[in-house]
Amino acid sequence: MHITELEIDNFKSFSKKTKIPFLEGFTVISGPNGSGKSNIIDSVLFVLALSSSRNLRAEKLTDLINLNSGKNTAEVAIEFSDGTKIRRRIKRTGNGYYSYNYLNDRLCKQSDIVDHLSKFGIIPHGYNVVMQGDVTRIMEMSDFERRKIIDEIAGVSEFETKKQQALSELDVVRERIEREEILLIELTKRANELKKEREHALEYQKWQKELGFFQGCRSAAQLHGKEKERDTLLASAEEQNIKISRINADRSIEENELAYLKADLADIDELLNQKSGPDYLKMIADIEEAKSGIKLAEQTIIRLKKDKEANLEGINRVFADTKRAETRVTELSDQIRALSIDRTNISMEVATSQSQLEKIEIEIRRYSSDTEEARQKLFSLMEEAETKKGERSAILHQQDMLIERSRMRTS
């Protein structure tokens, strides 16, 4: 690959756009001093980003812009024999400058151009471009320094650099592998620990399910006992209600008798007003007798009232106990309903596990039958081998006997 054309526009002494063709073979540019020959080399270094502004004999990049044209931009374009086009443009601004790089008319970064040229052995600070004084300096170098330049031109130094970089990266990779192996060992230990924890958790879940089942059974038994207790309390309340009804009936009778006695007393008082003498005394005696009966009736009524109040207190206690029992029955019914749902789910899981167990048992029986057949075949083969071994021993014994007889005959 070689340069075919160079285009310079407003760069250093080239105020106008200038195209310089480079034909195959040697292209020589000659001219008097100050005609701009070095500026052509500077433009090549500038567009290929092979040198800094100081090596281009400028304090800063904006000094490369021609001051006589009145334009604020400078541009250099280069084309190679493989069709690659590289263009670089700088523009002066109030705060500094902007630099633009183009690879095949596509805006890119300067590092992209450096990477592209490095594929063809064109690198910054290399010896693709030999400046004035470089030949003399090379001739005056020692053999070791000249060997370094040859290695750099041949790409050996770059290979060594890449080799060192690869070895450094290899060391880093080895360190990472060691760290990863340590981490893998730790993770393996942790995985074993987690496996044990998982087994413990599964065992815990199993016992939790059994505990829930037995708790449900206990709750059901407690509910059954509470229902019996409620039935007993209800029967007791019914008996108390019957007693109260009887007491109310007795009270009504006593009140009726008291009313009759009061009526009799009124009649007697009326007769008292009409009669006197022995009849009067008799009436007085009758009145006293009636008063005694009234007093006895009043005492009976008071006793019945006390019994009624005591029975009412018992009924209230029974009613409160009944309400508490009904509330407890409702709570236990909800618990039984939840436990029934859990029991249904557990039954489904047990059925699934049972089906899986049956499948596993079928497989075990199948494998057991296969193992039994193989064992029988093995025993038959062993018996056959023992038989053949016995036959072989008999044949060897016969051969020994024949050899012994032939030896005796020979002797």
Image: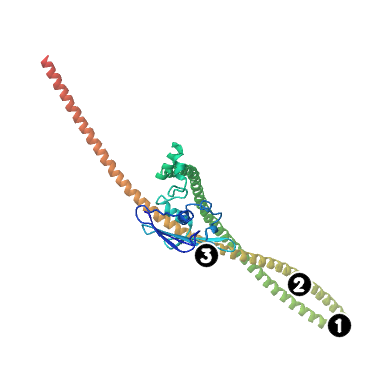
| Screen quadrant of the N terminus | bottom left
Q: Earlier in the sequence, mark 3 or mark 1?
A: 3
Residue at horizontal 66%, vertical 70%?
Answer: 241
Cα–Cα span, label 1 and label 2? 28 Å
Q: For mark 1, give the secondary structure.
A: helix
- Outermost residue on the top side: it is 411
Which kind of residue does numbered mark 2 sit on? Answer: Ile
Q: In the image shown, does 308 or 388 lie closer to the viewer?
A: 388
**From the viewer's perspective, is residue 104 above or below residue 208?**
below
What is the x, y in percent for residue 357? Answer: 40, 53
Asked whether residue 77 appears in the rendered view, the answer is yes
Q: In the image shown, does 233 or 158 lie closer to the viewer?
A: 158
Task: Give the residue at mark 1.
Answer: 272
Mark identifier at residue 67:
none
Relative placement, left or right, of 378 versus 349 is left
Which kind of residue does numbered mark 3 sit on? Answer: Ser
Asked whether residue 101 appears in the rendered view, the answer is no
Task: Give the residue at mark 2.
Answer: 301
Residue at horizontal 84%, vertical 82%?
Answer: 269
Q: In the image shown, does 195 or 267 lie closer to the viewer?
A: 195
Task: Give the residue at mark 3.
Answer: 69
**From the viewer's perspective, is residue 223 above or below residue 385?**
below
From the viewer's perspective, is the residue at label 1 or at label 2 nearer? 2
